Amino acid sequence: MYVIIGGGPAGRFAAMELAALNKETLLIEKKYMGGTCLNEGCMVVCGLNDIARFIDNAKNLKNHGIIDFECEIKYKHLLKKLKKTIKTIRKINEKETKESGVEIIYGEAKVIEDKVQVDGEKISYDKLIVATGIKPHIPPIDGVENAITYRDVLEIDELPEVINIVGGGHTASEFAYIFSRFGCKVNVICRSKFLKNLDPEIKKYVVEKLLDDVKIYENTKTLKIGEEYIETSKGKIEGKTFLATGVTPNSKIVNVKKDSKEHIIVNEKMETSMKNVYAAGAVTNRAKNTPVARMEGIVAARNAAGIETRMRYDYIPNSISLKYDVAFIDENKNKKLVNAKMPGPAGPGSFWEVLNKNTGLSKVSVDLNTGEISRVYAVSPIGRDYVAYLSHLLRLGSKVQDFDNFIEVHPSTDSVYKLLRFLAKRI
Ligand SMILES: Cc1cc2nc3c(=O)[nH]c(=O)nc-3n(C[C@H](O)[C@H](O)[C@H](O)COP(=O)(O)OP(=O)(O)OC[C@H]3O[C@@H](n4cnc5c(N)ncnc54)[C@H](O)[C@@H]3O)c2cc1C
């Protein structure tokens, strides 16, 4: 029997892979099928971001004098519909998982010696995959219980007038965009720099063009959180506090080797320090997003089934959802890189931004000695779609010269191929 704990992206994909390999597979989920991604994270942000983009676009068309209406958001109703939509997707996920041949049981699992215990029942396993994911990281700040996190977004009844987002990463920026377009005044309070891992030119574009009405405080410590205020090293700010201070792994249930942040340490076969116990997804020291979690689940399943497979972490695509996708692949391995950048072209989703000089921005960094494409940034309405395929091509070994004969679809807001075609001529 193959037992998987956790029905998020990593666990579900591990279970379905094992079922496809004709293994007897049991998936144990504590709460909801789909995990953080569907119920609290990616899909919640996606649902809210769609509305924020709609409001943004409507406002732009109104400013151009093309349409004539104000968007008024009905937040309570929005939440009701969002929950209903997530529930629908959850049911589809559950059906898909069961129909693939996986048995599902709901309950909180614990690993006790060589057995898994759920609601008092002890289950033996031949191979175990731990995919228990994450929960919000709550920093030790005075009054932190007054703050909300991504987990509470679906439960707050009305939008606060002012929202102070603590944190400077992807989640902080995504919620800053959403809440600002929903009409809240948004402050972002970062302990160090905002979006510090992004290319500086891309970050500048994001801050100036996509988060133009968000106030960002960098190098600012949060000292105390009240019900309706926050005290920082730069002074007191009124408003509700939203913590976007990262996540922490649900790794307590199993006694294997962990890193200093309690992530389960795995190798590229997703093996843990314990024989026959694998781990995959955000609970490990590796995965940071859903597609990687899914692939880790598949790799763990294959290895558990005796098919030796190694996880690859090169050219992983990422994306932040704002008015545009801020999609990127950042290997940054080479020192001698040639950069090329250009504004996004006019196309679906950016045509009516031409007059605002806000059509997006692309940037690529290439090693002209080898043709290796090390960094790609696409701020574009469809950036995430083409950056994912580009990532696949790079993993298959494509070099910049392979883009010399690229045939695009027109109109499109992909300007990365233009940059690559331009650089290909310099090889
Ligand atoms: C706000 C937010 C936005 C995000 N947006 C994106 C995005 O746009 N794109 C992207 O790629 N990634 C995004 N992520 C990251 C993504 O959600 C995670 O990488 C992904 O969910 C990890 O999947 P997982 O299966 O490893 O863990 P999870 O999705 O956390 O699933 C773990 C599951 O295990 C269950 N579980 C835990 N303990 C037990 C137990 N003892 N017994 C039984 N079940 C248990 C949990 O209930 C949960 O269902 C976002 C995350 C957040 C927080």
Image (spheres, rainbow, N blue to C red):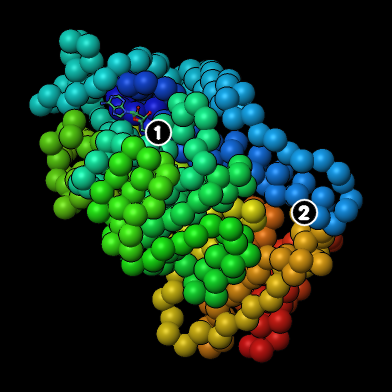
Direction from residue 123 to residue 349 in the image, left or right = right
Tell me, for residue 211, which label it has, or none: none
The mark found on residue 60 in the picture is 2
CA separation in Å, label 1 and label 2:
31 Å
Element carrying mark 1: helix
Number of marks in the rendered image? 2
Select label 1 or label 2 by which is in front: 2
Q: Residue at x 49, y 38 (%)?
A: 160
Residue at 88 percent across and 53 percent down: it is 65
Image position, residue 123 (x, y; %)? 21, 16
Residue 119 occupies quadrant:
top left
Q: Quadrant of residue 373?
A: bottom right
Is 324 located above or below residue 99 in the figure?
A: below
Name above or below for residue 402 compared with residue 310. below
The answer as to whether callout 2 falls within 8 Å of ligand 1 is no
Quadrant where the image shows the C terminus: bottom right
Identify the residue shown where x is 14% and y is 46%: 257
The image position of residue 365, as x and y in percent, is 55, 78
Ligand 1 picture quarter: top left
Name the residue type under label 2: Asn
Q: Which residue is mark 1?
A: 151
Q: Closer to the camera, 316 or 401?
A: 316
Classify the position of the N terminus by image quarter: top left
Whichever of labels 1 and 2 marks the residue nearer the N terminus, that label is 2
Task: Residue 173: give x, y in percent of width and height.
Answer: 49, 54
> Is residue 100 positioned above or below 178 on the image?
above
